[in-house]
Image: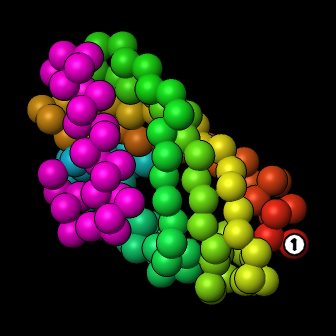
């Protein structure tokens, strides 16, 4: 994929996430992938995403910066939402969050084969009143 194609691919992925169209993840994630450095499967990534959306029904990802180098993509995003269930060990308080996420991906044959994400968990806990 060219840099432009990879950026468009990522924007489509984020669009599917924001529409909570998790059933579309087979378009974006390889059957087998590496998730945060550990071997995993698309079904495991889908389970994580469904868990996030179940706990935070208005979860929204907003890309702020995207960098592409060959088959690798890095992004800085702003994540927002209001948990309605316990999420990341924090009980819902009615408070919303706005945190930074840094994500790194590798794409082969048009799908993610490596996915890593780092969230600002301390800011999240502070904003949610934990």
Residue that mark 1 sits on: 129
Residue 8 vs 94, above or below: the answer is above
Give how far across and how far down residue 80 sits, in percent. Answer: 60, 59
Point 67% across, 82% down: residue:
86
Q: Residue furthest left?
A: 109
Range shown magenta:
1-27
Give how far across and how far down residue 16 sits, in percent. Answer: 28, 57
Point 59% across, 46% down: residue:
78
Residue 118 vs 7, above or below: the answer is below
Q: Secondary structure at mark 1?
A: loop
Residue toward you, 40 or 81: 81
> Can the viewer see residue 38 in this picture?
no
Residue 108 vs 18, above or below: the answer is above
Residue 78 vs 45, above or below: the answer is above
> Can the viewer see residue 27 in this picture?
yes
Quarter of the picture containing the C terminus is: bottom right
Mark 1 closeness class: few <14, some 14–19, many ≥20 residues within 10 Å:
some
């Amino acid at each position: 994929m060219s840099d432009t194609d990879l950026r468009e691919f990522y924007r489509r992925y984020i669009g599917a996430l924001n529409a909570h169209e998790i059933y579309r993840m087979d378009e974006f994630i390889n059957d087998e992938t590496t998730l945060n450095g550990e071997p995993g499967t698309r079904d495991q990534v889908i389970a994580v995403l469904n868990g996030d959306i179940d706990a935070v029904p208005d979860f929204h990802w907003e890309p702020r910066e995207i960098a592409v180098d060959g088959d690798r993509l890095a992004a800085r995003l702003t994540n927002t939402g209001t948990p309605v269930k316990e999420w990341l060990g924090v009980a819902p308080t009615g408070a919303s969050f706005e945190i930074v996420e840094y994500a790194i991906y590798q794409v082969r044959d048009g799908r993610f084969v490596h996915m890593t994400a780092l969230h600002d968990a301390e800011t999240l806990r502070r904003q949610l009143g934990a």
